[in-house]
Image (cartoon, rainbow, N blue to C red):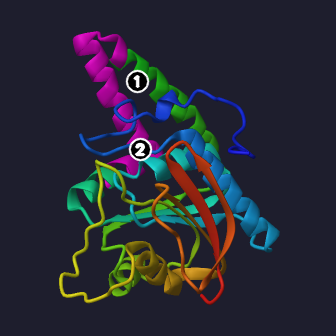
Amino acid sequence: MPYQFARERLNYAAFASGQVLHSLPGRPAFPARLASELYQRGAALLRGDGASPPYVLYDPCCGGAQLLTTLAYLHGETIAALIGSDIDPDAVQLAARNLALVTLPGLDARRAALADLAARYGKPAHQEALNHAAALHERQVELTNQRTITTAVFQADALNTADMRAGLAGAAVDLVIADVPYGQQTAWTTLDEASTSTEAPLWRLLEALRPNLTARAVVAIATDKVQRVRHDAYQRRDQWQIGKRRLTLLSVLNP
């Protein structure tokens, strides 16, 4: 069954790029419902293995952090920290702007900007975005009353172990969710031009993640149907397909 947790078709319009969340051309957004399903499946595995929330969530191919920001609003009660990284400095700047929306000051600033646009131009799209921001504000107040979700974002080559370790700065990750490069809009790139590795990019990503994971960590990866998620240090816990995407959940064997 494609959806075990996010079975209802809810209205996720508030998380669409260019509404409340910031966007740039060429930055594809990850479907909010599928992000919710991935998170809930990963969290269920963590709980089943004895790891209680809240969790540290990391996306090593975060782009504009639309996925992370969306999950903060959908499942913030069980999230302690959101961490994102990307090889592209422009993406990192965009991610920082979106992760700021997980705080009341950041969201209030965004609401003020949207209100100014609505007042100046009177476009229905601006008013719609402002309405979404108001709804997210109510949700953010609810989450803030429970705990503060810490956020961090840094530039890093997701295929480079030292790069990732330096950026995470000792943070122990419970759950990784990554929509890895594929298709026409994104492709694997690396800062390590001197690398002679013949391993596939996904193997190198999993290898780079290993030193930063908790003992019961879960790694959830979205790929196309061609790429294979394989590494001897991980156990596959779940795999299914939705449309053109293959979703794979792994547990680490030797963190």
Return the mark for residue 129: 1
State the residue lying farthest toward the left: 193
The residue drawn where x is 70% and y is 43% is 3
Which residue is label 2 attached to?
Answer: 105
Q: Is residue 177 left or right of residue 252?
A: left
Of residues 111 and 71, the one nearer the viewer is 71
- Indicate whether residue 115 is drawn in magenta: yes
Q: Magenta residues?
A: 96-125
Q: Is residue 218 above or below residue 14?
A: below
Disc 1 marks a residue whose amino acid type is Ala
- Indicate whether residue 101 is drawn in magenta: yes
Of residues 232 and 50, the one nearer the viewer is 232
Which SS class for mark 2?
helix
Disc 2 marks a residue whose amino acid type is Pro
The residue drawn where x is 48% and y is 53% is 68
Q: Is residue 42 above or below residue 243?
A: below
